[in-house]
Amino acid sequence: MKLLNSIAVALLVLLSIQIQAQNRPNILWINGDDLGAELSCYGNPDVYTPHMDKLASEGIRFTKAYSNAAVCSASRSSMITGMYPPSVNSHDHRTIDKTPLPQGIEPIVTYFQEAGYYCINGNARNPKVKGKGDYNFTNKIEYDDINWNTRAEGQPFFAQIQINDPHRTFHHDKEHPIDYKTVSMPKCYPDYPLLKADWAWYLESVQHADNYVGQILKRLEEEGLANNTIVILFGDHGRPHLRDKQFLYEGGIHIPLIVRYPDGKNAGTVDEQLISLIDVAASTLAMANIKQPKHMQGIDLLGKKPNKRKYIYAFRDRAGDAPDNIRSICDGQYKLIWNRMPNQPYMQLSSYKRLQYPAYTLYHEYYKSGKLKAPYSQFMASTRPEIELYDLNQDPNELNNLANKKDYANIKNKLFKKLESQMPKFEENRIAEAPETTLKAKKSSDAYLKTSLKKRGLDPNISDKDLLIYWEELLLK
């Protein structure tokens, strides 16, 4: 009898959860891989993004949204837990010595499933395979499926649809080609034809991402789901260019964020508050009426009783064969970057960038020949200042370091004190990578580079001069 009563109680609890879940909205994350804020609705005149623009007109466009890391695995580990990367020991890109999440911390997928949601991770390019995960912890996330149509009738879903574009290798857009001769480059880069061609290629890949967004939104409409689905579109971090991805400058962490509510709430509005990707995790739980765990560092900025964020924090550690340790804090106008390995040059060897970024080779070759002029040549310095400080209102390209300017001493001291004081808490669970592990990463990256160059028909030990010629022949046709 006791067993039967226990079973009955368990069934009632399960039924209660299912009934509550049916009254909750579907939530859809659309995640662009390496998608920076280079969209038409964000003011870029050279790119054609009608679907994301339409989504922005129907929702809320956030202008000051940021990732917590400038590389995918650290950022994705952060966003799926609502925790800063070192707080869950997920700070190194593609962590080799992975560990479980700290005690009591779960991916938000777990909380959704406990609340009766059906959780999927889909792939926009190939709906028959699962979407990108790329998490730096050993916990396996047990998604229910890759397609929300397999859920029970009336069951709400929490879905992530991963879009591979505009991650390199870029793809041309034959329907809406972009003439590199007419594009406007970000002012943080010199105006060279090769870099403009690479930039135009990136924008065409952004357009591919936009096409996938259109397909996803069309599917919601056709299946009658748009009227009960909150859509959240963002990039996992900033754009894949030389001083952007893997760095904590604006190009590396500034992302698009668009939220569309099914009832048209605040449609077409622009929100200038500071928001972090871990806040998207916290806010998503609030949207589903799921209580936020106390450990979560994200803030509900989108719910019924939104809070306000005073600072954005970002983190960079080893990425491939490029070990580093950078932390940053931004109050919306001033950004302070703390280079905790200042003897490491900006342009240390990065096999990934040498293989994929024309600018990486161009900078090295032009600097050797004296063609790379200031202020761009400062990125070739053999060391870095320990502290960098930028006024984003006056210097959005972050080329004029104010850290040693007397007039900015108070601002620097305030931001640094705040950043430094937070590190013991943020890094409580961080495990520094062992030297032998870093060496393993370097050897693996070197092998990847040489194998990939061979596949392109290039000498694995090709010189910068010859590699630059390869890029020019490929892009300046």
Image: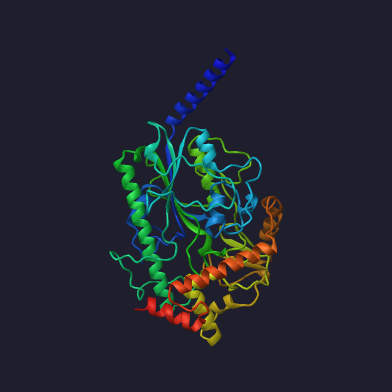
**Quadrant of the frame with the C terminus:** bottom left
Rendered position, 64 above or below 113: below
Between residue 267 and residue 221, name the one nearer to us: 221
All told, the count of numbered labels is: 0
Looking at the image, which residue sits at the far bottom?
A: 369
Q: Position of residue 332 (x, y in %)?
A: 56, 57
Rendered position, 139 above or below 13: below
Taking the image as shown, residue 419 lies to the left or right of residue 71, namely right
Rendered position, 241 above or below 73: below
**Quadrant of the frame with the N terminus:** top right
Q: Position of residue 254 (x, y in %)?
A: 50, 59
Taking the image as shown, residue 41 lies to the left or right of residue 115, namely left
- The colour mode here is rainbow
- Identify the residue at horizontal 63%, vertical 39% (top origin): 294
Q: Position of residue 216 (x, y in %)?
A: 35, 48
- Identify the residue at horizontal 69%, vertical 61% (top origin): 434
Between residue 116 and residue 225, name the one nearer to us: 116
- Identify the residue at horizontal 50%, vertical 42% (top origin): 284
Between residue 54 and residue 193, name the one nearer to us: 193
Q: Position of residue 356 (x, y in %)?
A: 47, 70
